[in-house]
Amino acid sequence: MVSPSPKKDLSRFVYCSSLLEEKIAKVYENLAKVINDDLFKCLFRYIASDSLKHAEFFRALSKWLNPDIELSYEECAEVWGEKWKVVMEHAEVFQEKGKINHEELSSLIDGLEKLEGMVAEEYLTIMHIRLIQLMAEDRKIDLDYFKKILEWIIEDENRHEQILKTIKSKLIK
């Protein structure tokens, strides 16, 4: 069996990141719909908007690496392993939530922080962005054009965690 080319291998990794970001955006869009607080709606939409931008960037980058790339969620589970399934299961729970009040939201924030933590830890933190860069360097794929955008995504993910902490502190008061 012939293994995929380095660009195709990297494009699979990045493409799955785009699917993950789309899923996370849907979670936050749903939460914005079901919460009764306008400020929290705005903050959830803010995170959803960032996540959609991340998804679009990762999709474009994966297509740049491999114009024919198309993967399903199941194939991404093979690319990422067990952690992918855990993140997707958590995302499904939040995506299906109905109307929630402040008390329920407070307990949900803990779960959202875990979800963001899993995403940040496993997919979009400096470690994985650096891994993409190292894989690209090792395989002679020039990602210099994209380095700054990748750094911005890391900053966005850190900001998302801060937004959740802010919401949680407002709920406690």
Image (tube, helix red, strand yellow):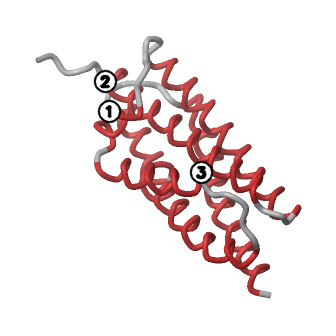
Residue under the image location 52 percent in, 60 percent down: 115
Report the side of 168 relative to 86 (left or right). Answer: right
Task: Looking at the picture, tell me which residue is in the foreground, 91 or 132.
Answer: 91
The answer to whether residue 16 is left or right of residue 169 is left
Query: Callout 3: few (<14), some (14-19), or many (20+) C-alpha neighbours within 10 Å?
Result: some
Q: Which residue reaches farthest top? A: 68
Q: CA distance from mark 1 to mark 3?
A: 38 Å
Determine whether, in the image, residue 135 is placed left or right of residue 162.
left
Q: Is residue 11 above or below residue 125?
A: above
Q: Which mark is residue 6?
A: 2
Q: Amino acid at mark 3?
A: Gln
Expressed as whole percent of the image width and height from the top left, the position of residue 93 reads: 52, 56
Give the residue at x 65% y 46%: 152
- Residue with the mark numbered 1: 138
Image height of 91 relative to 158, above or below: above
The three-letter amino acid code for the residue at tag 1 is Asp
